[in-house]
Amino acid sequence: MSIDLSKSIRKSIGLTLILLLILNTCSFATEHPTQWHLEKIFADTTEFNANAENLNRELIPKLMNFKGQLSDPKQLEACLTLYLEASILSDKLYVYASMLQDTNTANSDYQEYVSTAMDAYANLEEAAAFINPELMTYTDDELIHLSKKRQFQPFESFFLSLVDERAHVLTEEAENVLAYATEFSEMPKKIYDQLTTSDVHYDDFLDPLGDTRRFDFDIDTIYFYSNQLDDRVKANDAYAKPYSQHANTIASIYIAEVQKNIFLAKSRGYDSVLEYATSGIIEPDQYRNLIETTRANAQLIQQFNHIKQKSLGYEEFHSSDFHLPYASSYYQEISYEDSIRSVIDALAPLGDQYTAKLNLFLESGNIDVYPDEFKTNSQYTWGAYDAPVYILLNYSDDFISESTLAHELGHAMHQMYTIENQNYFDTNVGSFPSEATSTLNELLLLESLKNKADDDELKLFYLEKEIELYYETFFMQTILADFEMRVYDEAEKGNPLSLDRLNTLWLETSEDYYGNSVILDDAYQYQWMQIPHMYQTFYVYSYAMSLAASTAIKDHLITEGDAYQKKYLDFLKSGSSLSPVTQMANLEIDLDSTKFYSTLFTHFEGLLGEMDQTLESLKYYDKHPALDYLYSPSEIKMAYKEYYATQKANADSEASDDPSDLDAGASEDFDDDFYVALGISIIISIIILFLYSIFITVLYVSKSKRLKRLEHELLHSPRRYESFDDRY
């Protein structure tokens, strides 16, 4: 057999390069997981059902046996220990079932699992209804004394909360009634979620080619950026149409939510739903102070809208113009992996320990990243005490998604630090401290990206985004919080609510802030219906208040460095063991100071001034370059033709990919030269990989002692409960 050695060598070199490219791709394309793994909570639905049955048939009956025996400290300890176990399991059941349903809201089996979890929770609350009334037979001094005993250490906050809430704990019979209402009280939000994710459809949209069909978010959103006002109004009407069609239903659902909360607040002896919902977090007067102070500075919102209108060159400014680019028209696709790198780099001011822990979480497979047909449209961070923390995203390769990732990672890190360092009863962090951690991450991301921007257009883009962050997170959320306050004030006065009244309240609230700077188009009246947080009672204020806090935290981190990093990590670890007022004081922030909001207003006004000067110097007010990035009617029509052509080509391609069309005789007989070349290339690749492995080993061994200590601290630190060890 004759072998052409030179030919074999040439082939071996080519094959070696191919093999190394493949191996390099496999070795270094370490993409992060994009689907969450709920089996870390329960292996499957069989285990879920088994745990639900265990809770209902074993734990709950045992708990009920302690009724009437809590005056005995030993029985009290045994009862609370069992109640803690049952509560942790109940939380896991509900979190698992709810997140399972959120991945596919149209799956009826998943809806049944949620019902199972809710039933189990209601059963537990009913069975445990005797605990608080029996504990209330102890005096305040006795409860405080119990909280200091070693065996009751996990329940210290529970005892102290009873002291604080004594006036709101009811008789056993009354507690039983409220326990019966547990599942009912969750129904308005569940119905709203089900309606808006599965039954709201965007139908009857007329495209520029004359076809009427369902609104297609992949192409029809181009109308939001049309250079014709009529087209922008048309797009906003199309987006609002499903809500207008279901307006009476959605209004009825929200009215039921309001009446439910009034019932619960009155049942527990609170003066208002506002006091009930913010109890232990902030005072009602602090909430109203946010509203009144912001309303008094509404000229900043109007100044912002004036800058947008002037930059666009419009004679009038409409609510359908809110989303138009007015400064930088810079746009780039940002992959999930690129976002991760940017976020990790931006959060460096929080310290090595924070970012190392963040990396572990990103690699854990606890984030569900991309949208799916029946996946819920919400984005959130959630978890249970004896289970991992998870993030649900709907990532769409843009800056908004990148910013949302940073935001939710702030929540995730807060939850993880809290769970690892606190007892169960000290992990219920209020919305205000929680949102401070997430908005801080957004501010740090913007600061980092703005500093790295290498051209004026990109810097202008990030300046615009920083202004919009303050506008949307502080001012817009305050408008929503004001609307919510007016709704409950109206209802608690006994005035009837209706669709028309809710829409009127929404428009009146908006006009108090916008003044005459904006013309509110018809679709705007339905905007409040599109906010899922309206079913988290008095929650949206926390976004605004937290941004004021995170603005101060960012400044401290930049000026104080390592010393303040420790204060911030201590804050993350403290959970709900301290009041938000105390937590902020430990971060050198005084919630009662008049500077709390005035600092933010001054900063925002400075950003507006910087934007105004920049646009003036770049001649944006004269040339209106943002308009160049809007679409003319002919460009929109061409975009539709290209979109439909691409769809047709993809469909034809899929139809032609039939395996039966492949030539069964297409396989080739390889010559001897190929096999010799393949052998040589494999040997060369093995040698190169061997040398590379030696290099990596040496590099690893030579790591600094500081990094080794950090790695050891993160991976081997003692935890309060061993069950947390599978979290990563």
Image (cartoon, rainbow, N blue to C red):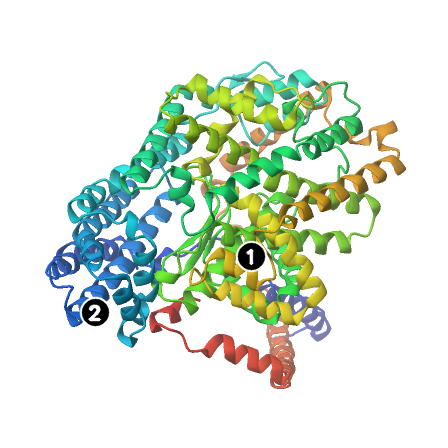
Q: Is 461 left, or right, of 3 in this rendering? A: right
Q: How many marks?
A: 2
In the image, residue 427 lies at what x, y percent?
Answer: 40, 60
Q: Is 651 left, or right, of 447 in this rendering? A: left
Quadrant of the snapshot with the C terminus: bottom left
Labelled pair 2, 1 in contact (Cβ < 8 Å): no
Up-down: is 167 above or below 355? above
Seen at 19% across and 43% down, the residue is: 174
Answer with mark 2 or mark 1, whichever residue precedes in sequence.
2
The answer to which image quadrant residue 558 occupies is: bottom right
- Asked whether residue 274 is in view, the answer is yes
Kind of residue at disc 2 = Glu
In the image, residue 535 lies at what x, y percent?
Answer: 41, 37
Q: Nearer the viewer, residue 389 or 74?
A: 74
Quadrant of the snapshot with the N terminus: bottom right
Kind of residue at disc 1 = Glu
Up-down: is 381 above or below 219? below
Classify mark 2: residues with Cα within 10 Å, few (<14), some (14-19) or many (20+). Answer: some
The residue carrying mark 1 is 668
The residue carrying mark 2 is 77
Q: Is 396 left, or right, of 318 in this rendering? A: left
